[in-house]
Amino acid sequence: MATDTKTQPSGEVSKTSFLATRWVQLLLGLSVTVVVGLLPYLGKFIPLLAPLMSILPEAIQPLAVPLAAASMGIVAVIVQWRIGHKLPVEQLNLWFRQTIVACAVSLAVLAALETIMVVRVDVPAANRTVSFAIGPSHPNVPPCVGLSRADCIKHQLSLDEASIDSYFGEGWVNATKFVLVVVYTIFMSTFGALAVMLAWQMKLKFTRSSEAAT
């Protein structure tokens, strides 16, 4: 008697459906977090998102924003994969608390770096503010003796990136840019992980309430 080769055991169908669902969830999480990570770029076109662009100096945005978006996507996939393998609720809660601490610390460090090592300069002619990563020091040598760092950049260095690097020290400038990129990436990655874990906790509570109702 001929057998239907298209017929699959119910166990295989269930396993295939489960894997397909998991891959869709992982792909969706990756896509959403990457898009969120790239939102600062939209500040160039959407005024409402413009403040996101001002967090980082323009010189490091082409590196920091895509790197943070990629890191957010990777972290989101890892978190979803671990949770999908029946991670205990206690472990998930511990991860959530640890990630909140890491996110808060990285945000505080980023704020400190932005305050101490980044200078913002108003450019009335262009109706905008530009920022430069220069480090914590001021050489206070000609042509900027007696001037603040912002006035030095605006009036003596003419907002020229190469001149700014030379005056404030290329080593300090490069070190500041590197630290900013790393801290920004950590902050965005932990923020993305928090969003994923919060979504899973809400989904778990909804599932449990639905099962209790039935």
Image (spheres, rainbow, N blue to C red):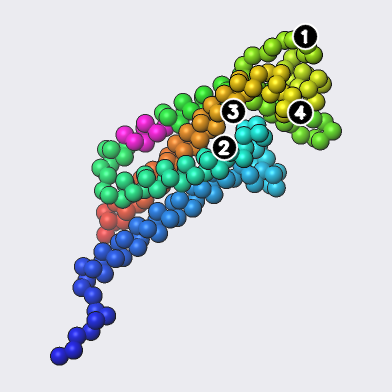
**Crowd band around label 3 with a 10 angstrom C-alpha radius: few (<14), some (14–19), many (20+):** many
Give residue 195's position: percent from left, percent from top.
44, 43
Q: Which mark is residue 64?
A: 2
Give residue 98's position: percent from left, percent from top.
37, 31
Asked whether the viewer can see residue 97, the reply is yes
The three-letter amino acid code for the residue at tag 4 is Asp
Badge 1 is on which residue?
A: 146
Looking at the image, tell me whether mark 2 or mark 4 is earlier in sequence order: 2
Q: Residue at x 31, y 34 (%)?
A: 94
Q: Secondary structure at mark 3?
A: helix
Q: Residue at x 34, y 49 (%)?
A: 81
Up-down: is 18 above or below 205?
A: below
Q: Which mark is residue 192?
A: none
In the picture, which quadrant includes the C terminus?
Answer: bottom left
Front one among 198 and 186? 186
Gap between marks 4 and 3 measured at Cα: 16 Å
Q: Are marks 4 and 1 in contact (CB under 8 Å)?
A: no
**Dividing the picture into quarters, in which one does residue 51 lie?**
top right
Q: Look at the image and give the residue range highlighted in magenta.
A: 94-100
Q: Nearer the viewer, mark 4 or mark 1?
A: 4
Looking at the image, tell me whether mark 2 or mark 3 is earlier in sequence order: 2
Up-down: is 64 above or below 10?
A: above
Q: Residue at x 66, y 43 (%)?
A: 43
In the picture as drawn, the residue positioned furthest to the bottom comes out as 1
Q: Secondary structure at mark 1?
A: loop
Looking at the image, tell me whether mark 4 or mark 3 is earlier in sequence order: 4
Q: Secondary structure at mark 2?
A: helix
